[in-house]
Image (spheres, grey):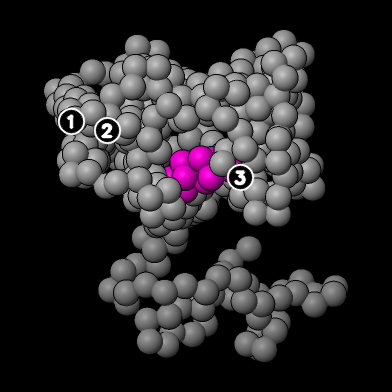
Amino acid sequence: MKQHLLTQSHGQYLFYTPAYTQGAATPMSTPQCYMPTIFCNFAPQKTIGTTLQRMTTDSSNKPQGKPASIWQRPMWVSLFALTAAMAWGWAYPLIKLGFEEFRIEGADAGSKMLFAGIRFAVSGLIILAAARARHCRMTPARGSDWLMVLAFALVNTTLHYAFFYIGLWYSAGSRAAILNSLSVFAVVLLACVFFRSDRLTTRKIAGCAMGIAGIIALNMGGTQSSDFNLLGDVLIALNALCGAAASLMTRPLSRRIDIFAGTGYSLAIGGALLLMAALPMGGTLPRITLWGTIILLLLIAISTIGFTLYNKLLSCNPVGKVAIFNSLIPVVGAVTSCMCLNEPFQPKYAIAAVLAAAGIYIINKGKK
């Protein structure tokens, strides 16, 4: 069927297909009976055939792409990662305040495990309830994938925070916050071992050297209680390594189960395992007060918000792009510990924080 050019106005061309009336052999000749078929813009000097060919080519070869997820848009990635880092920085003084309010003594490992177990088990149940309300996939595709979920729970929660809670008692909150930044450098080095796409570069070596210099600066000084403590520092370092390993496990986990559900299972199962270990050790909460309950609820909120945001970001972004924000955790932890716990702020804390943050920046500079 032929098409006819009926009108031209301001470089706009309107094509019409002749309309046939019922039983007519030829089209009706009046313009009112023409049916519009194509409306297009193009320069008058271009031929109609060239323009139609270009329209056909463009529509077939240049499909519209999906907009990036909110979890991958730079502004939102920065905002969510910053929120998680700020929340985790506040955990350091709140944990120590919680120990004091519940009357948990330094050598009472069972009560510390009980305190941690309650925090993470409740947080995990909250995330699982939210995931179910969002109709997330709550079970892995294969039964064997539950082993991955269990391994993630052990590394991300049980071992991670068993080391952290016990080590934090022997190490000052501000000092532990900076020492815990080792996890960022561990992520960088372990990624080079396990992922072919991550290679050990000069930039990464220089960044790790800066971070190690910060740790050395942290351990220099006199005989104050905030100085070097072997047991406390080793436990915090092991906690950092568990955090690094969990970061590397997040993306494989997200391929087996929805990451929100996986995070909920990790905290709920890991918290339950901490409770199972605490009870035989005689763990109790010697004193329960309103202020202590508020502190515990704040820590539950920190876990819920921090892990939900961080694990989701890790599942759909490069690890380094998200981990760079963890450089803020030692800074926030050191400042809030000095504010809330009356711990003395020593110049070496600032030096160590600057060196650790500089190392993280060097490692991640130029990442796309």
Measuring 68% from the left and 12% from the top, which residue is drawn there? 147
What is the C-alpha distance between the residues marked 3 and 2? 24 Å
x and y, in percent, of residue 283 in the image: 70, 24
* 191 inside magenta stretch: no
Residue of label 1: 221
Kind of residue indicated by mark 2 = Gln
The nearer-to-camera label among 1 and 2 is 2
Compared to residue 284, the image places residue 125 above or below, namely: below
x and y, in percent, of residue 13 in the image: 45, 78
Q: Is residue 37 among what the camera can see?
A: yes
Q: Of the numbered discs in the image, which one, if any, rests on residue 224?
A: 2
Could you tell me how many numbered marks the image carries?
3
Kind of residue indicated by mark 3 = Glu
Q: How dense is the environment of label 3, judged by Cα within 10 Å: few (below 14), some, or many (20 and up)?
A: some
Give the mark nearest the N terminus, 3 or 2: 3
In the displayed structure, does residue 142 sit left or right of residue 176? right
Q: Quadrant of residue 185?
A: top left
In this view, the residue in front, 312 or 354, is: 354
In the displayed structure, does residue 222 sit left or right of residue 275? left
Kind of residue indicated by mark 1 = Gly
Is the magenta region chiefly helix, strand or loop?
A: helix
In this view, the residue in front, 4 or 42, is: 42
x and y, in percent, of residue 317 in the image: 44, 37
Q: Which element type, helix, strand or loop, lies under badge 2?
A: loop
Q: Which element type, helix, strand or loop, lies under badge 3?
A: helix
| Marks 1 and 3 close (CB-CB < 8 Å) | no
Q: Quadrant of residue 184?
A: top left
Q: Is residue 243 among what the camera can see?
A: no
Residue of label 3: 101
In this view, the residue in front, 176 or 80, is: 176
